[in-house]
Amino acid sequence: DAGVIQSPRHEVTEMGQEVTLRCKPISGHNSLFWYRQTMMRGLELLIYFNNNVPIDDSGMPEDRFSAKMPNASFSTLKIQPSEPRDSAVYFCASSIRGTPGRYGYTFGSGTRLTVV
Amino acid sequence: DQQVKQNSPSLSVQEGRISILNCDYTNSMFDYFLWYKKYPAEGPTFLISISSIKDKNEDGRFTVFLNKSAKHLSLHIVPSQPGDSAVYFCAASAGSGYALNFGKGTSLLVTP
């Protein structure tokens, strides 16, 4: 199993540009999570999906952020327009629904986003 | 509002000694608690978990203790090894329908 695959690994973009982060969860996992890591706030949940349906997006900072999961094997997190304060490491994780408390999630390697 | 708190941002321990990482939580609905380990440029990896009905879970050199009355848990690593140097995140779950809440992490450095 290749694990959770995120792309790109690094992204540098100018303020105001659109940024799209991609995630392929582990096959068979039906819950997908997007987290953001910053020094100030640690790992914070942005949004999660169960069976491709968004369940909780209360962590999405503002309307500039949007996430989709068109099918069980792909999800995107889009920032439009991007701002310097969006600079962070964005992680995608997946799990089998109903088990995150027992077995945890499997995280991808993250996308380091820098907005200049 | 941070429901899971790791108040020590860093910890330094000598190789062979015990490392104790602490975590406090505020939500009494949490039923599972987990520890994750993270190396630079990698995603967090699951280390060990404990159910709220237990007070101790052990896996090799790693033991997690849960004190529900104090809303406190700790991770003990014995003996500590240089390869244990990483950031450790405490996390908690309020049920199968909820996502994990993470603390801000504690950076552990194990020196030879």
Image (cartoon, rainbow, N blue to C red):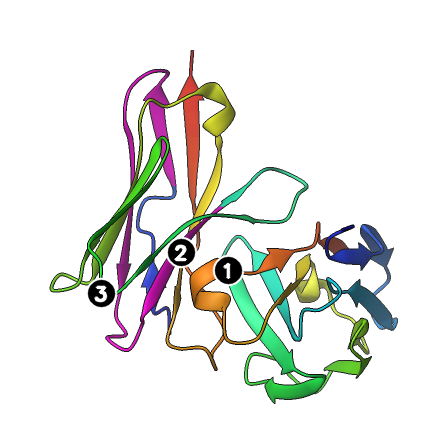
Q: Marks 3 and 2: in contact by CB < 8 Å? A: no
Residue A60 lies, in percent from the top left, at 62, 80
Residues B96 and A15: in front is B96
Query: The numbered mark 3 sits on a residue in which chain?
Result: B
Query: The numbered mark 2 sits on a residue in which chain?
Result: B
In the figure, A108 relative to A68: above or below? above
Residues B68 and A45: in front is B68
Could you tell me which secondary element the residue under label 3 belongs to?
Answer: loop
In the rendered image, residue B2 lying in the magenta stretch gets the answer: no
Q: Which residues are magenta?
A: B10-36
Disc on res. B64: none
Label 2, label 1: how far apart the Cα atoms are: 7 Å
Magenta stretch, main secondary structure class: strand
Which quarter of the figure has residue A102?
Answer: bottom left
The residue at the far top in this view is B112
Residue under the image location 78 percent in, 56 percent down: A5
* Amino acid type, callout 2: Leu
Residue occupied by mark 1: A104
Residues A43 and A70: in front is A70
Neighbours of disc 2 within 10 Å: few (<14), some (14-19), many (20+): many
In the rendered image, residue B16 lying in the magenta stretch gets the answer: yes
Residue occupied by mark 3: B53
**Left or right: B65 with respect to A97?**
left
Neighbours of disc 1 within 10 Å: few (<14), some (14-19), many (20+): many
Residue occupied by mark 2: B34
Residue under the image location 48 percent in, 82 percent down: B97
